[in-house]
Image (cartoon, helix red, strand yellow):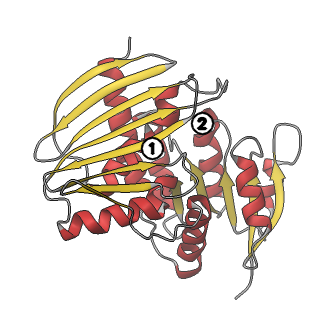
């Protein structure tokens, strides 16, 4: 099978990760990198040999770049957030419907995290019993001001919740959101409760999910070097023997497989649109 030819938009704090991953693959070739100071977007759109575009630029640029890429006949791997409003998501939907032969995948990396995938399998087996709550806490050690913490970090817990349980009818929102922090709880009808705490600054980085079920619970701490997932059941702590790969690599593997096999991705436009809608609804009700 021929190598897929990639163009990468953005080589900053997150884009550089894609740069290294694509450059070291046998089934892909990184043709060009477009940044503020180098490369040409127009040249990418005109280049019929470019198969795929990865967009890892500031969120405000996502809509225009994705529309242009799809319109130019490129498959797109788009970093979260997919869009910054439901209105923008609707604009993107119009384009995706015109180019159904092209893959649009949103890079919700935790959906491709081996620990999260393990949790989903065990939840579906009934190991945890009825799930009461998913809690998430993120603290970023960053001075990035491209976007407020809510739109930057909240897509992580929301996408994980969507993947594990699916969104249901919302009964209540409680909490407060500002640019540097967000603390909120969402109660869904016939679904677990979602509780999220996000902070821009702090003494250390935090990336934690806590699952609370009737029979068992689990803590996933992504800041640990090993034994990231701990399960508590019957008064005992269990470390499941998971051989976990790098989530971003798994995400890229999956995207390439979707392109090669013309397969709709799990985190497609519809998945991204549902996350965008919930983000907008929470912000509308709780932003101070």
Q: Which residue is mark 1?
A: 156
Residue 241's spot in the image, x, y percent?
43, 70
Q: Secondary structure at mark 1?
A: helix
Please tell me whether residue 209 is drawn above or below residue 109 in the rendered image: above
Total tally of numbered discs in the picture: 2
Please tell me whether residue 197 is drawn above or below residue 156 in the rendered image: above
Query: Which residue is at a point 38% across and 45% down the rendered structure image?
Result: 209
Q: Secondary structure at mark 2?
A: helix
- Check the image and name the residue furthest to the top: 288
Please tell me whether residue 159 is drawn above or below residue 84 in the rendered image: below
Using residue 267 as the reference point, say whether residue 174 is left or right of it: left
Query: Which residue is at a point 40% across and 59% down the rendered structure image?
Result: 116
Tell me the quarter of the image containing the C terminus. top left
Q: Is residue 45 visible?
A: no
Residue 100's spot in the image, x, y percent?
48, 66
Residue 33's spot in the image, x, y percent?
82, 53
Along the viewing direction, whichever of 167 and 276 lies nearer the viewer: 167
Dot 1: within a 10 Å radius of its alpha carbon, few (fewer than 14), some, or many (20 or more) residues? many
Dot 2: within a 10 Å radius of its alpha carbon, few (fewer than 14), some, or many (20 or more) residues? some
- Check the image and name the residue furthest to the front: 235
- Check the image and name the residue furthest to the right: 38
Q: Is residue 31 visible?
A: yes
Using residue 259 as the reference point, say whether residue 123 is left or right of it: left
Along the viewing direction, whichever of 3 and 233 lies nearer the viewer: 233
Q: CA distance from mark 1 to mark 2?
A: 15 Å
Tell me the quarter of the image containing the N terminus. bottom right
Q: Which residue is mark 2?
A: 59
Query: Which residue is at a point 80% across and 50% down the rendered structure image?
Result: 42
């Amino acid at each position: 099978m021929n190598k897929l030819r990639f163009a990468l938009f953005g080589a900053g704090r997150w884009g550089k990760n894609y740069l290294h991953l694509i450059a070291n693959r046998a089934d892909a070739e990184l043709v060009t990198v477009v940044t503020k100071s180098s490369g040409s977007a127009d040249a990418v759109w005109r280049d019929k040999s470019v198969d795929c575009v990865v967009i890892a630029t500031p969120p405000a640029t996502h809509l225009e770049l994705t529309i242009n890429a799809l319109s130019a006949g490129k498959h797109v791997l788009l970093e979260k957030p997919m869009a910054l409003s439901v209105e923008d998501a609707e604009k993107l939907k119009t384009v995706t419907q015109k180019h159904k032969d092209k893959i649009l995948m949103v890079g919700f990396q935790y959906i491709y995290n081996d620990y999260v995938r393990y949790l989903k399998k065990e939840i579906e087996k009934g190991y945890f019993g009825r799930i009461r709550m998913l809690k998430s806490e993120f603290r970023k050690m960053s001075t990035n001001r491209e976007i407020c913490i809510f739109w930057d970090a909240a897509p992580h817990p929301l996408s994980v919740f969507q993947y594990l349980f699916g969104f249901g009818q919302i009964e209540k929102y409680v909490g407060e959101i500002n640019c540097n922090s967000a603390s909120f709880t969402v109660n869904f009808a016939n679904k677990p409760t979602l509780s999220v705490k996000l902070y821009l600054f702090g003494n250390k980085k935090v990336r934690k999910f806590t699952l609370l079920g009737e029979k068992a619970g689990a803590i996933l701490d992504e800041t640990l070097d090993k034994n990231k997932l701990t399960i508590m059941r019957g008064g005992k702590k269990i470390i499941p023997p998971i051989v976990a790969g790098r989530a971003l690599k798994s995400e890229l593997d999956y995207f390439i497989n979707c392109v090669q096999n013309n397969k709709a991705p799990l985190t497609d436009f519809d998945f991204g649109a549902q996350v965008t809608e919930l983000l907008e609804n929470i912000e509308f009700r709780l932003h101070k």
